[in-house]
Image (cartoon, rainbow, N blue to C red):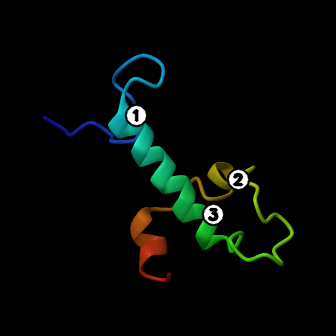
Amino acid sequence: MQRPDPMIPSKPGAEDVEAMGNIQSWIDALYAHDGRNAKDHPQHGLYTGLALKYKGLNFADISDND
């Protein structure tokens, strides 16, 4: 049996607290990886487009570099 993806909720809406936390952790990691945490970044404070920009990236790809 294959382990289910921890990013895909198994409960309706936002009831799957673990999956919602995993998603938030991932988007926060992408935000930092993109440099948007720097005050001088043109998209500082915006999460818009991060998931699409890094859709093929794995967590290991960014955790090694940051």
* CA–CA distance in space, label 1 to label 2: 19 Å
Q: Amino acid at mark 2?
A: Tyr
Q: Amino acid at mark 3?
A: Tyr
The residue located at (40%, 41%) in the rendering is: 7
20 w.r.t. 52: above or below? above
Q: Give the residue drawn at x 27%, y 36%.
A: 4
Mark 2 Cα-neighbour bin, 10 Å: few <14, some 14–19, many ≥20: some
Which image quarter holds the N terminus? Answer: top left
Q: Secondary structure at mark 1?
A: loop
Looking at the image, the residue that sits furthest to the top is 12
In the picture of the structure, the residue carrying the numbered disc 1 is 8
Give yes or no for contact between labels 2 and 3 (Cβ–Cβ under 8 Å).
Answer: yes
Q: Earlier in the sequence, mark 1 or mark 2?
A: 1
| Mark 3: few/some/many CA within 10 Å (<14, 14-19, 20+) | many
Q: Say which of 2 and 13 sits in front.
A: 13
Given this view, does label 1 or label 3 mark the residue nearer the observer?
A: 3
- Pointer 1 or 3: first along the chain: 1
Name the residue carrying label 2.
47
The percent position of residue 12, horizontal first and vertical second, equals 42, 16
Which residue ends up furthest to the bottom in the rendered image?
65
**Residue located 40% across and 47% down the image:** 22
With respect to residue 21, does 59 lie above or below?
below
Q: Is 35 on the left-hand or right-hand side of 60?
A: right
| Image x and y of residue 43, in percent | 82, 63
Q: Please provide percent x and percent y for residue 62.
A: 49, 73
Q: Which mark is residue 18?
A: none
Towards the viewer: 30 or 21: 21
Label 1 vs label 2, nearer the camera:
2
From the image, tell me which residue sits under label 3: 31
Q: Is residue 11 left or right of residue 3?
A: right
The first of marks 2 and 3 along the sequence is 3
